[in-house]
Amino acid sequence: MNLISTTASPPVLVITLFLVAGCSSIGRSVDPAKYDSMSCTELNRALGGVARDISQTAVTRGKVANASVPRWLLGGARVKTVVTDRETARIDRLKQQEEALVSARARRCTLPSQ
């Protein structure tokens, strides 16, 4: 009976990795064409959301990369690599979005000269 409970745990880990990878791709995105019509407050809010998403994705990527996958679990290491690569690609997309927001904010929301 004890053997059954210990063998159920690694598949649960793999299923969890799949769910985390799938759910991490769900999020709000802002169309870069709409940045010029956004107010400074909306740009700041969107920039904060993107920064939060980058942080959460980096934490998820770190957890997956540091997960211990047993050797006997066929394909476990490959799943771990695929999920890590997917999270890295998502971080890259979010950083591009962040750069677009920063440039739009710099164009639109200049500080008054003193």
Image (cartoon, helix red, strand yellow):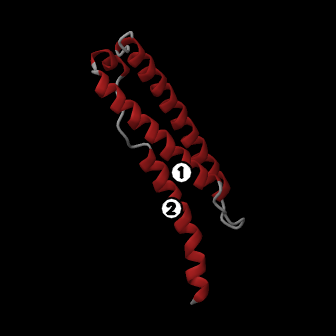
Question: Could you say which is closer to the camera, residue 7 or residue 90?
Answer: 90
Mark nearer the viewer, 1 or 2:
1
| Residue 104 position (above or below residue 57) | above
Q: Residue at x 42, y 35 (%)?
A: 50
84 to the left or right of 43: right
Image quarter of residue 39: top left
Q: Which residue is mark 1?
A: 60
Question: Could you say which is closer to the camera, residue 113 or residue 30?
Answer: 113
User: Disc 1 versus disc 2: distance between alpha carbons?
Assistant: 15 Å
Nearest to N terminus: mark 1 or mark 2: 2
77 to the left or right of 45: right
Image quarter of residue 35: top left
Q: Residue at x 52, y 68 (%)?
A: 12
Position of residue 93 measured from the top left corner of the image (x, y, whole percent):
50, 30
Name the quadrant of the N terminus: bottom right
Q: Which residue is mark 2?
A: 15
Q: Residue at x 55, y 82 (%)?
A: 5
Q: Of helix, strand and loop, which one carries label 2?
A: helix
Position of residue 2 measured from the top left corner of the image (x, y, whole percent):
59, 88
Q: Is residue 75 visible?
A: no
Q: Amino acid at mark 2?
A: Ile
| Residue 59 position (above or below residue 92) | below
